């Protein structure tokens, strides 16, 4: 039985069916990329652990602690661009293929408005990236806790949060840009994404964004919801 | 339709926020000349202030004096007289004493007394407190090293442990094992409690470096506002309660250990008063200065063989007061000798600042001179209600002319937002413009 025939009795039921179908379709479609990214991120975290261990082999532990705690050295700095690159790779894999020969329009014919369908797609990506980034953060905190006191774990969390947020913004911005058919709006999407990633990845010092990180959590839903515009433009691109 | 309107609004919010940071920042990178703060000193020869600063606006006399090399750096005194770099250095020999020695000008004779390099080095101190370095404005890992004051060797060494102040104890963590050290924790916690220390402490101050001639230990403010000095000698605690009166609750103690110096550093209290902090008996000498605000001002205390000069500045103005002090008994009351205030060159407004204030109605800065962490600093243009509004009106007219908006579709909301937000809304409006014009 077609799942959409079940969804006729109510709009809410139809929406949830569409949502679950999109999640199912996207999980099958992006599975190889998701697996690849998990593998690459795991490799990177292992590499990070090796680098961290090397610090303690080359120097006395109190000297490494001094460099990290008093001189502001960030031993996990190589992680900075990993979320951004992971997000861009996932975005391209998820949407570039869909945009070829306008395949995504098949999804847009599901019994739900086009904006919601595209937002569901983006939501799937956000959920996956959040899981991936949570894995990265947990791995980082575990390895740091092995060598450092808990204070360093907290500051590492605050320091890396903007890097992971940059990844989420890059994913949403990339989705907007890929879907948007109008060149002017596409350019605006590129500019917005570039600026916000630049802001979040402008390296300063440990826990630099501690006081203002909430602002980016407010902007994240704005960025997510702005994708509805590009979805509508895509649907009406020949109108 | 509603959903589309909300998502369009989201794009505008994002654009305004991001462009109000990015455009002024980009403009500054391309055009703005960043200049450091003016360096102001008290000349022991002329008994007046001399200063050097980088200029934002051309100065012909400065060019002549510099012979066109570093022509934007001026050396002047408070009466407006210009100097060459060498003349300027000669005015403040206690600062440039190495150059004075090289030029064969030692011993210096000032007011009938002679000063050589040894005397100058003995008394010369520079103590600083930047507004960015206040405890609540910087990130600090609250786990500190407590150095061994008697290392039994020439140089100080980092200990293999660090301590954190918890609710009930001074807890030591071993760095090799990354695990607590119960014996050392008990030893120091018991010693602290025996001296009347009440946990949990509020603040910990110290000079956590091994690059100093000796270690003076750390200073801790307990939960009742009492200050304590903790020293680790032969791995045993030496704890002293500081004899501060109840009015001088420290907001910050700046420690700077120097060989043969009677001054340990300075203390900033909760009333923004500054005190010299002496090694002997933890005595305090009040430095009477007015208008100092630690939240927005950087402070420097210079000691030389004759004078103590306090220099403090915000972003625009610099203030300095020179005091006589008795080098034999530095705890004597300080007598103000000369005070001087002046606007710094960085307060000047060259053409590019005026243009920026006209074209950008406001800007968001994430960096601040007064914080070591990112802050959300919204600055409204000084010209917002004058040239800024004219510029925005001009933009609104241009937009309505060239974007071919039909009279009936003229949006008052768009125009009003453009008057307030200027370029920041114009760019997304142009980019989001679409079918309406067909």
Image (cartoon, coloured by chain):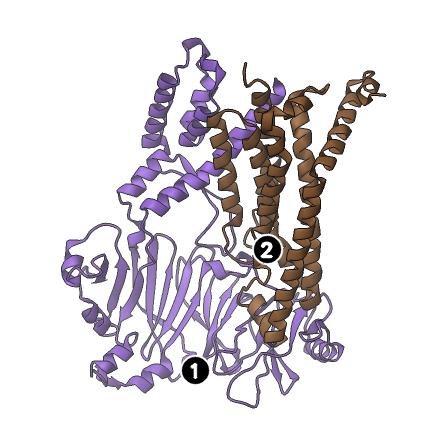
Q: Residues within 10 Å of mark 1 (few under 14, many from 20)?
A: some
Identify whether A101 is placed above or below A83: above
> Is B274 situated above or below B257?
above
Q: Nearer the viewer, residue B230 or B56?
A: B56
Q: Chain of mark 1?
A: B
Q: In this view of the protein, which residue sits in the foreground, B190 or B371?
A: B371
The location of residue B139, given as percent across then percent down, is 56, 59
Report x, y in % for residue B179: 73, 72
Residue at the (26%, 42%) spot, across then down = B351
Distance between mark 1 and mark 2 Cα atoms: 46 Å
Q: Mark 2 highlights which residue? A: A79
Contact (Cβ within 8 Å) of mark 1 with mark 2? no
Pointer 2: residues within 10 angstroms few (<14), some, or many (20+)? Answer: some
| Residue drawn 47% across the image and 31% down it | A187
At a point 50% along the width and 45% down the height, the residue shown is: A199
Residue at horizontal 46 percent and vertical 26 percent from the top: B431
Q: Which chain is purple?
A: B
Side of B64 where B6 appears, left or right: right
Residue B58 is situated, as x and y percent measured from the top left of the image, at 20, 51
């Amino acid at each position: 039985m077609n799942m959409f025939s079940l969804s006729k009795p109510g709009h809410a039921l139809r929406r949830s069916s569409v949502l679950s179908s999109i999640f199912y379709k996207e999980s099958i479609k992006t599975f190889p990329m998701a697996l690849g990214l998990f593998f690459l991120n795991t490799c990177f975290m292992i590499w990070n652990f090796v680098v961290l261990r090397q610090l303690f082999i080359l120097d006395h532990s109190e000297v490494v602690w001094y460099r990290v705690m008093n001189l502001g050295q960030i031993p996990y700095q190589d992680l900075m661009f990993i979320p951004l690159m992971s997000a861009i790779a996932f975005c391209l894999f998820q949407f570039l293929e869909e945009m070829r020969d306008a395949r995504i329009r098949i999804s847009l014919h599901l019994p739900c408005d086009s904006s919601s369908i595209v937002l569901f797609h983006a939501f799937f990506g956000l959920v996956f990236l959040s899981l991936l980034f949570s894995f990265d953060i947990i791995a980082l905190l575990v390895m740091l806790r092995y060598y450092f006191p808990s204070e360093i774990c907290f500051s590492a969390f605050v320091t890396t949060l903007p890097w992971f947020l940059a990844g989420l913004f890059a994913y949403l911005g990339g989705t907007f840009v890929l879907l948007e058919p109008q060149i002017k709006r596409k350019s605006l999407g590129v500019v917005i994404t570039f600026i916000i990633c630049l802001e979040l990845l402008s390296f300063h010092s440990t826990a630099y964004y501690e006081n203002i990180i909430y602002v980016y959590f407010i902007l994240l839903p704005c960025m997510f919801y702005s994708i509805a515009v590009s979805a509508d433009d895509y649907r009406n691109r020949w109108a | 339709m509603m959903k589309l309107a909300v998502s369009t609004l989201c794009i505008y919010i994002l654009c305004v926020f991001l462009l109000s940071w990015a455009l002024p920042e980009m403009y500054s990178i391309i055009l703005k000349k960043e200049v450091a703060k003016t360096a102001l000193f008290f000349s022991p020869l002329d008994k007046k202030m001399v200063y050097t600063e980088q200029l934002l606006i051309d100065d012909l006399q400065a060019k002549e004096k510099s012979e066109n090399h570093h022509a934007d750096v001026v050396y002047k005194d408070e009466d407006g007289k210009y100097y060459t770099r060498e003349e300027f250095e000669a005015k403040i020999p206690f600062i440039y004493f190495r150059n004075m020695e090289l030029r064969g000008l030692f011993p210096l004779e000032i007011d009938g007394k002679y000063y050589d390099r040894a005397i100058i080095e003995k008394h010369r101190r520079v103590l600083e407190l930047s507004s960015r370095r206040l405890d609540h404005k910087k990130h600090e890992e609250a786990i500190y090293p407590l150095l061994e004051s008697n290392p039994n060797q020439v140089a100080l060494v980092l200990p293999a442990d660090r301590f954190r102040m918890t609710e009930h104890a001074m807890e030591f963590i071993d760095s090799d094992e990354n695990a607590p050290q119960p014996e050392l924790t008990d030893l120091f916690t018991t010693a602290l409690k025996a001296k009347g220390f009440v946990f949990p402490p509020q603040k910990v101050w110290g000079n956590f470096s091994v690059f100093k001639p000796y270690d003076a230990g750390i200073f801790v403010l307990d939960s009742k506002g009492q200050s304590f000095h903790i020293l680790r000698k032969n791995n045993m605690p030496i704890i002293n309660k500081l004899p501060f009166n109840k009015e001088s609750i420290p907001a910050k103690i700046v420690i700077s250990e120097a060989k043969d110096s009677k001054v340990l550093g300075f203390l900033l209290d909760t009333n923004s008063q500054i005190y010299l902090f002496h090694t002997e008996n933890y005595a305090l000498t009040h430095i009477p200065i007015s208008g100092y605000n630690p939240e927005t001002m950087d402070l420097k205390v210079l000691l030389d063989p004759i004078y103590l000069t306090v220099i403090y500045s915000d972003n625009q103005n610099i203030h300095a007061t020179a005091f006589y002090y008795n080098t034999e008994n530095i705890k004597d009351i300080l007598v103000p000798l000369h005070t001087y205030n002046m606007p710094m060159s960085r307060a000047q407004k060259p053409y590019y600042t005026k243009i920026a204030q006209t074209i950008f109605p406001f800007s968001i800065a994430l960096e601040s001179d007064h914080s070591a962490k990112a802050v959300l600093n919204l600055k409204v243009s000084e010209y917002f209600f004058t040239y800024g509004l004219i510029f925005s009106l001009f933009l609104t007219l241009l937009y309505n002319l060239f974007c071919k908006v039909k009279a009936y579709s003229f949006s008052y909301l768009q125009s009003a937002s453009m008057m307030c937000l200027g370029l920041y809304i114009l760019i997304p409006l142009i980019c989001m413009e679409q079918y309406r014009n067909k």
